[in-house]
C-alpha cells in the first residue's frame, strides 16, 4: 500500500491528515475528462514501481531500455518507431506474482484551478474537478489504483462499473 501525494506543498491544493506521524500528505491535482465524471488514468509514470527491490528495479530498467517484455509474460517486441515500454508496465512485469499494489491518491477539490494542474488540462479535453470548489457539496477525493503483477497464467476478468446505480457487470 502506498500513498501518492505531491512531493511539495501547493497551498491551494492543501494537505490531508491521515494520522501518519511525521509526514505531511500534500494533495494532488487531477482534473476530470470533459463531459464526463471520470478522472481517467490517475497513475503517474513510475508509481507502480513503489515497493520494488533494487534487483527488481534494475530488471525494470532493462525492460524499459530494451523495449521488450519478458517471454514468460508476453512475447511482444515494441515496433521500432515506438520502442518503449512504460515504467508502470515494466514494473508490473517484474513484480512478484504474490505482491499486488494498492495506490492511494489524495485529490484536491481545487483540481483544475491551480498552477500545478495537469499539463495543459483546459486545452486537452480536461476541465476542473468541480465547477465551484467552494460549494459545500464539493469534496476532496480519494483515488484508488490497483496494480496487479503480470501473470503467466491469465484468468478470465470480470469488470464492474460504479455510477449513479449500484455495482453491475460491464457488458
Image (tube, rainbow, N blue to C red):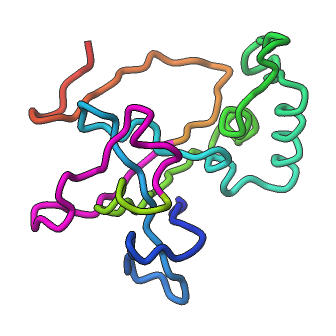
Residue 120 versus residue 153 in the image, above or below: below
| Of 64 and 100, the residue lying toward us | 64
Q: Is residue 120 magenta?
A: yes
Q: Where residue 43 appears, x then y in whole percent?
A: 53, 45
Name the one closer to the observer, 76 or 81. 81
Overall secondary structure of the magenta stretch? loop
Could you tell me which quadrant the C terminus lies in? top left
- The spot of residue 42 in percent (x, y) is 46, 44
Q: Quadrant of residue 108?
A: bottom left
Instruction: Find residue 139 and report its image quarter.
Output: bottom left
Q: Position of residue 145 (x, y in %)?
A: 46, 45
Using residue 87 as the reference point, say whether residue 142 is left or right of it: left
Q: For the point 22% across and 35% down, which residue is it?
A: 162
- Up the image or down, 108 lies above or below 56; here it is below
Q: Is residue 120 left or right of residue 50?
A: left
Q: Taking 33 as reference, is 99 left or right? A: right
> Residue at horizontal 28%, vertical 27%?
160
User: Which percent across, then down, holds residue 165?
Assistant: 9, 33
Q: Which residues are magenta?
A: 117-146
Quarter-of-image position of residue 34: top left
Number of numbered discs on residues: 0
Q: Is residue 73 left or right of residue 61?
A: left
Kindly give the residue lying farthest to the bottom in the view shown. Answer: 22
Q: Nearer the viewer, residue 33 or 152?
A: 33
* Rendered position, 76 above or below 162: above
Residue shown at 50% from the left, 53% from the top: 103
Residue 170 in magenta?
Answer: no
Amino acid at each position: 500500500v502506498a500513498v501518492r501525494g505531491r512531493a511539495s506543498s501547493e497551498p491551494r491544493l492543501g494537505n490531508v491528515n491521515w494520522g501518519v506521524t511525521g509526514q505531511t500528505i500534500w494533495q494532488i491535482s487531477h482534473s476530470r475528462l470533459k463531459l464526463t465524471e471520470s478522472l481517467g488514468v490517475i497513475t503517474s509514470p513510475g508509481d507502480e514501481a513503489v515497493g520494488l527491490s533494487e534487483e527488481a528495479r534494475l530488471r525494470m530498467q532493462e525492460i524499459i531500455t530494451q523495449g521488450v517484455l519478458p517471454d514468460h509474460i508476453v512475447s511482444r517486441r515494441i515496433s521500432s518507431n515506438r520502442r518503449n515500454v512504460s515504467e508502470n508496465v515494466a514494473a508490473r512485469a517484474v513484480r512478484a506474482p504474490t505482491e499486488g499494489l494498492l495506490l492511494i491518491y489524495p485529490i484536491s477539490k481545487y483540481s483544475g484551478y491551480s498552477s500545478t494542474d495537469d499539463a495543459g488540462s483546459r486545452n486537452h479535453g480536461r476541465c476542473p474537478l468541480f465547477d465551484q470548489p467552494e460549494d459545500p457539496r464539493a469534496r476532496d477525493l480519494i483515488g484508488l489504483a490497483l496494480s496487479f503483477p503480470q501473470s503467466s497464467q491469465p484468468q478470465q476478468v470480470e469488470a464492474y462499473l460504479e455510477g449513479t446505480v449500484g455495482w453491475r457487470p460491464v457488458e
